[in-house]
Amino acid sequence: MSDNISISVNETIQHIQICRADKMNAFTDEMYQSVATALKKSHKADGIKVNLISGVPGCFTAGNDISDFYTYAEKGNFSPGIIDFLTTLGTLDMPLILAIDGPAIGIGTTMAFHADLVYATPEAIFATPFADLGLTPEAASSYLMPKTMGHARAYEMLALGEKYSAKDACRAGFVNKIIPSDELISHSLNIAKKLSKKPESSLLATKQLLKTEQEYILTVMEKEVEIFTKQLQSKEAKAAFSSFLNKTK
Ligand code: COA
């Protein structure tokens, strides 16, 4: 279990908190693995009915750790944690709520398209600067984003790298509601509690009925990983990683 992921279970609600504040909650492989393991455990055998993922006050996540991207570029492949996390997101049968404050970059934005409910503060910023890093969409965002918000807006985020505010994200259909930052966690936990009181079989069947394309989503993810891995090794990507890492040193 990663020290940067904190997990608390209260009755039937599992709260997974990303806590790597000194690095803007950037995801390492160990962190992906810990979240994936926690989500996979959340089956009825464990008595968990709802999962909530949040960051720390002022930061959801700055996306994948860029120094790890550099290492993957050198090695030519990802570590297994990312793949496990993506597959888990794409196949999760339990309800998933996200509570987003501050930056939600890269996977921070794309995981919203797998969640069932998303709450964000007025300070939330959504961005998928893949093309700026010489990269391409991941987490089935190449399919789920245009499906949710239309091609024009998806392209604006995925290729142009435009940032979306919480209001933009609400309008685009991937955030449910804007909540003041000091109420974000209590609001999200209240909603989780409300959901958890409903019959489990109804919750599971409803999600299954709404998410009919699991198999296709896994195929999209696989294709994206193949292209992303090639892009990671491009000179443009390596230059973008070096530039970020040198700037922030
Ligand atoms: N990977 C590794 N380290 C990261 C990181 C990332 N994705 N994002 C932030 N950090 C680190 C910085 O290197 C810095 O570390 P240092 O204090 O040891 O130098 C620390 O977190 C604080 O980041 P900083 O950039 O100084 O904070 P900021 O408030 O000025 O900016 C962001 C916040 C999120 C806008 C900015 O950090 C950023 O753009 N991060 C990269 C986002 C990204 O491109 N992610 C990949 C998506 S595919």
Image (cartoon, rainbow, N blue to C red):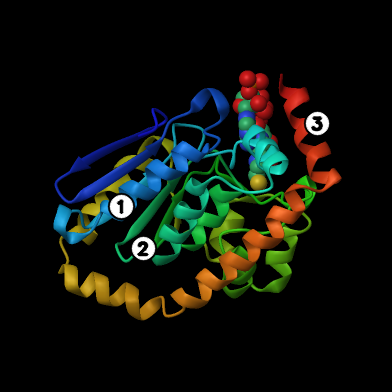
- Residue 67 horizontal side relative to residue 30, left or right: right
Q: Report x, y in % for residue 54.
A: 41, 42
Ligand 1 found in image quarter: top right
Task: Report whether the residue tagged 3 is closer than 8 Å to ligand 1.
Answer: no
Comparing labels 1 and 3, the label whose residue is closer to the camera: 3
At 51% from the left and 40% from the top, the residue drawn is 29
Q: Report x, y in % for residue 194.
A: 21, 58
The residue at which mark 2 appears reads as 92
- Is residue 166 in view from this perspective? no
Task: Give the farthest residue toward the front.
Answer: 75
Q: Report x, y in % for residue 97.
A: 37, 54
Q: Which of marks 1 and 2 is nearer the N terminus?
A: 1
Q: What element carries label 2?
A: loop
Position of residue 60 relative to residue 49, above or below, is above
Within 10 Å of disc 1 (Cα), the crowding (few <14, some 14-19, many 20+) is many
The answer to the question of whether label 1 and label 2 lie on touching residues, with beta carbons closer than 8 A, is yes
At 38% from the left and 41% from the top, the residue drawn is 34
Which one is nearer the viewer's eye here, 5 or 193?
5
At 17% from the left and 66% from the top, the residue drawn is 198
The residue at which mark 3 appears reads as 243
Within 10 Å of disc 2 (Cα), the crowding (few <14, some 14-19, many 20+) is many
Q: Report x, y in % for residue 39.
A: 33, 52
Q: Which of marks 1 and 3 is nearer the N terminus?
A: 1
Q: Quadrant of the N terminus?
A: top left
Position of residue 58 relative to residue 22, above or below, is below
Per the rendering, the mark at residue 51 is 1
Q: Quadrant of the C terminus?
A: top right
Within 10 Å of disc 3 (Cα), the crowding (few <14, some 14-19, many 20+) is few
Residue type at mark 1 is Asn
- Residue 229 horizontal side relative to residue 179, left or right: right
Position of residue 225 relative to residue 187, above or below, is below
